[in-house]
Amino acid sequence: MTYQKLIFKIENSIARVTLNRPEKRNALDADLIGELKAAFREAGAKTEVRAIALNGAGKDFCAGMDLSLLQRTQQLDVMENIEDAKLLMDLFLLMRRTPQPIVAIVHGRALAGGCGLATACDLILAARSAQFA
């Protein structure tokens, strides 16, 4: 798969998944969530992958949901918002079911959904600069 909003590579039995929207502080949108699911599925299917490292490009790990996505939810009804929330829930469930351990490498901010993304991992390595909220 070709990734637009993340970087995926395998080196020395480690799948490295990097959120690559530094201009948006790696905020999650539907496309990035879809790419994360694809990357975790791809890594999970490879027997040579022993672990998955998840990090963010730029100053922050992940600032949560993209503001444009959050603003869109104001126009949705309850059932549409439930379907929208399932995007993130499905990602977190997939992460928990991935056979290899996922390690969050957190620097800068991990806010809201970004904090949830980190805590959905099996292990968190936090830099001194890490802030969870």
Image: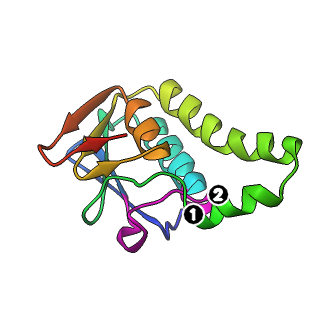
Helix, strand or loop at disc 2?
A: helix
Residue 72 placement, left or right of 99: right
Q: Quadrant of the N terminus?
A: bottom right
Q: CA distance from mark 2 to mark 1?
A: 5 Å
Helix, strand or loop at disc 1?
A: helix
Residue at horizontal 52 percent and vertical 56 percent from the top: 28
Q: Residues within 10 Å of mark 1 (few under 14, many from 20)?
A: some
* Residue 70, numbered label: 2
Q: Quadrant of the C terminus?
A: top left
- Where residue 130 appears, as percent x and y from the top left, is 21, 45
Residue at horizontal 44 percent and vertical 31 percent from the top: 120
Q: Which residue is mark 1?
A: 67
Residue 79 placement, left or right of 114: right
The three-letter amino acid code for the residue at tag 1 is: Leu
**29 or 69, which lies in front?**
69
| Magenta-tinted stretch | 19-32
Q: Which image quarter: residue 119?
A: top left
The three-letter amino acid code for the residue at tag 2 is: Leu
Asked whether disc 2 touches disc 1, contact meaning CB atoms under 8 Å apart, the reply is: yes
